[in-house]
Amino acid sequence: MASDRKRQIISAAAQSFSAFGYKATTMEQIARLANVGKGTIYTFFKSKEELLDEIISSLIAQIKTEAEQAMDPSLPFSENVPRALYRILKFRQRHQLTAKLLQEVRSIGTAAVQEVLAKFDREMVRFIRCKIEAAVEKGEIRPCDSEITAFVMLKTYIALIVDWEKEHEPLSKEQIAELFTLYFLQGLSK
């Protein structure tokens, strides 16, 4: 069946991108791993870039589902957003493909990989923005520029989880939530 072949190709590509990175992966490798001819790949995808985009789109859907599951409708925004952000970033860190792609961007700067990771970040900002807008509507937080706030929240979480750990002991989930509450929900003013 065509849909089975397409899934085989996507799975093989994800496996190859995870092991070798985007740049070092060839369509021949993907075809070999998927046990299909190289031409079969091109019946479903015009290019390696399109194949990577399909995989990242699927990951985005998975991560949004995980973030939603981390949230509890009975809890306020102030508790739910840190839970969702933590889940998003832990998913991104532990998922072999995103880890490899992040490494490739840092070491090589592959343009196609930068583009899909930017798409990933845009979608995460959009997800958080919607949660902020809902919280404003409910009166849980004061009105703000939801897109800028979502962007800053995401980047702060990345900094606290990824960048901080480069030179310091990792922060616990609870410490990160406390810092998030202090900086975003209470502010530093007296």
Image: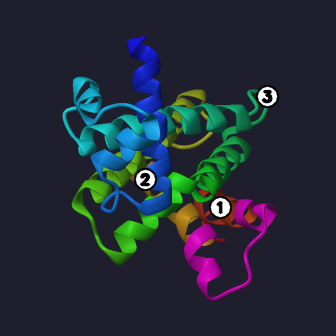
Q: Amino acid at mark 3?
A: Ser
What residue is drawn where x is 37% and y is 53%?
117
Answer left or right for 55 relative to 86.
left
Which is nearer the N-term, disc 1 or disc 2? 2
Indicate the quadrant containing the C terminus: top left, top right, bottom left or bottom right.
bottom right
Residue 64 is a magenta residue = no
- Tell which of 51 and 69 is nearer to you: 51
Q: Residue under label 1, please give it.
A: 180
Residue closest to the eye, 151 or 62: 62
Q: Name the quadrant containing residue 75.
A: top right
Percent of width and height locating residue 16: 45, 51
- Magenta residues span 161-177
Secondary structure type for disc 3:
loop
Q: Is residue 111 visible?
A: yes
Which label sits on residue 74?
A: 3
Q: Amino acid at mark 1?
A: Phe
Q: Earlier in the sequence, mark 2 or mark 3?
A: 2
Among the two numbered marks 3 and 1 on one chain, the one whose residue lies closer to the N terminus: 3
Percent position (x, y) of residue 171? 74, 73
Q: Is residue 60 visible?
A: no
Q: Mark 1 falls on what kind of element? A: helix
Q: Residue 149, percent across and down?
A: 45, 52
- The residue singled out by tag 2 in the image is 17
> Against 132, is 179 above or below?
below
Q: Is residue 118 above or below residue 188?
A: above
35 relative to 96, above or below: above
Relative image position of residue 176 (x, y in whole percent): 71, 65
The numbered disc on residue 71 is none
| Other residues around mark 2 within 10 Å, as few (<14) / some (14–19) / many (≥20) | many
Query: Separation of disc 3 and disc 1 at Cα?
Result: 20 Å
Q: Amino acid at mark 2?
A: Phe
Q: Nearer the viewer, residue 72 or 55?
A: 55
